[in-house]
Image: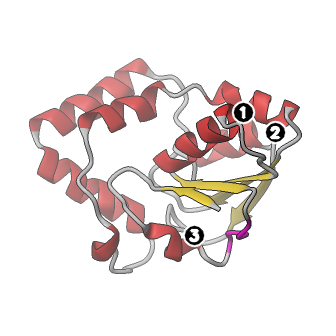
């Protein structure tokens, strides 16, 4: 399995073991990493049977919101990351320190510019797509994400779970 990490994370695959299906032909990603996993599945010459998107960083196109997030990150990166991580952990108090990595501005920009319409091509390639979304996720727009992804994937809506599922 190829796994892609989320924004500000590294090697957090262990957090999602109960959802991930290991296999040579599976690709998975968490949050920002879900975007990277989709790109991989679309552009690889290798066989892909299953694409697993864990709390995909799904943001409806909203230039004002994206600009606010990017400007806040630029002005006070430390505080932005602190607030971001609190929202990622909600509603748990799990210690995620060992999974943290230094996020970069270009990654945040990529997250807000991503075109999720690419998922249509994965569906056309007959890739099995699974999406996992937590009911209490404070990072993404849960309602719109569920509505969007149910057109392309089997969506698992996890009660009482946040971004970390």
Q: Residue 79: percent from the left, percent from the top?
A: 15, 52
Q: Count every numbered label the image shows and give the total.
A: 3
- Residue 141 seen in the figure: no
Compared with 98, 146 (above or below) is above
Residue 123 falls left or right of residue 33: right
- Residue 153 seen in the figure: yes
Tell me which secondary structure the magenta stretch mostly adopts.
loop
- C-beta proximity under 8 Å, tags 2 and 3: no
**Dot in front, 2 or 3:** 2
- Quarter containing the C terminus: bottom right
**Dot in front, 3 or 1:** 1
Q: Which residue is mark 3?
A: 161
Q: Residue 64: percent from the left, percent from the top?
A: 36, 21
Mark 3 and mark 1: span between their CA atoms?
24 Å
Circle 1: is it few (<14), some (14-19), or many (20+) Cα within 10 Å? many
Decide which of 12, 87 is in the foreground and name it.
12
Compared with 89, 112 (above or below) is above
Find residue 139 and name its label: none
Residue 72 falls left or right of residue 134: left
- C-beta proximity under 8 Å, tags 2 and 1: yes
Query: What's drawn in magenta, residue-wise?
Result: 19-23
Mark 2 vs mark 3: which is more N-terminal? 2
Q: Which residue is mark 2?
A: 152
Residue ranking furthest to the top? 63
- Quarter containing the N terminus: bottom right
Image point (40%, 19%), residue name = 63
Q: Which residue is mark 1?
A: 119
Image point (51%, 69%), residue name = 13
């Amino acid at each position: 399995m190829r796994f892609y990490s989320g924004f500000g994370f590294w090697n957090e695959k262990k957090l999602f073991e109960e959802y991930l299906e290991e296999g040579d032909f599976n690709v998975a990603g968490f949050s920002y990493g879900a975007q990277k996993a989709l790109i991989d599945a679309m552009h690889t010459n290798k066989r892909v049977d299953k694409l697993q998107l864990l709390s995909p960083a799904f943001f409806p196109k909203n230039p004002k919101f994206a600009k606010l997030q990017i400007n806040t990150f630029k002005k006070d990166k430390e505080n932005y990351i602190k607030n971001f991580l609190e929202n990622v952990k909600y509603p748990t108090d799990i210690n995620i320190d060992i999974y943290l990595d230094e996020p970069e501005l270009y990654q945040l920009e990529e997250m807000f510019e991503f075109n999720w319409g690419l998922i249509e091509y994965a569906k056309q390639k007959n890739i099995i797509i699974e999406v996992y979304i937590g009911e209490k996720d404070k990072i993404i727009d849960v309602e719109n994400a569920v509505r969007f992804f149910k057109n392309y994937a089997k969506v698992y809506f996890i009660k009482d779970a946040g971004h970390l599922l």
